Image (spheres, helix red, strand yellow):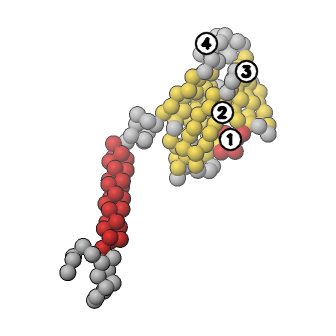
Amino acid sequence: MDETGSRKYPVDEHFRFQRRTWIVERVGWVVLIAISLVALTGLFGTGGPLESGLVTGKTLSIDYQRFERRTRLARFIFRFSGGSAEHTLHLNDAFRNTYEITDIQPRPAGGAAEAHGYDLTFSSKASSPGAVTVWAKPHRMGVIHIAASSGDAPPLDFTVLVYP
């Protein structure tokens, strides 16, 4: 009798299906071990090499965290270039719908929450390099596509993953 073929007696056995199931199971083991090793190395964690991102445009650069926890405050640093006395920061609707701003340093001179996002105005001083830090708490999970712009420049797009 062929051991690799399917048998009907005493139990209905399907060896080909069983072998495919074993292969899928072993691939799953390898994936789980790889995820565990990546987590142990801290690749995506705080201070890890893939944790922070930087987007640079003509008038604005953004330093942000690519991976955020829903239970933790997120930090966004917006740096303005140009010597104007006043800087305007526009954050899109995805930012407004995902984050609750808890603090802005320095405080904006003016601001408005509109249907298409936030518009914040900052007056720059000679001693200030034109950097604004926004602390916000995410209130939903998922992949968030955020756009930020300063003045009439085209918006800078970046993506943040918020996980539990």
- Report if the CB atoms under discs 1 and 3 are less than 8 Å apart: no
- Report if the CB atoms under discs 4 and 2 are less than 8 Å apart: no
Which element is circle 1 on?
helix
- Give the label, 4 or 1, closer to the camera: 1
**Does the image show residue 108?**
no
In this figure, which residue is indicated by the disc labeled 4?
127
Which element is circle 4 on?
loop
Up-down relation of residue 76 to residue 57 (above or below)? below
Q: Point out the image quarter for the N terminus.
A: bottom left
- Report if the CB atoms under discs 1 and 2 are less than 8 Å apart: yes
Marked residue nearer the N-terminal end (3 or 4):
4
In this figure, which residue is indicated by the disc labeled 2?
147
In this figure, which residue is indicated by the disc labeled 3?
151
Q: As shown in the figure, which amino acid type bears the numbered disc 3?
A: Gly
Residue 110 on image: x %, y %: 77, 27
Q: Name the outermost residue toward the bottom.
A: 10
Which element is circle 2 on?
strand
Q: As shown in the figure, which amino acid type bears the numbered disc 1?
A: Ala
What residue sits 59% from the left and 16% below the top? 129
In this figure, which residue is indicated by the disc labeled 1?
94
Residue 146 on image: x %, y %: 63, 36
9 or 95, which lies in front?
A: 9
User: How many residues crowd around disc 3 within 10 Å: few (fewer than 14), some, or many (20 or more)?
Assistant: some
Disc 1 and disc 2: Cα gap in Å? 8 Å
Disc 3 and disc 4: Cα gap in Å? 21 Å
- 101 vs 67, left or right, is right
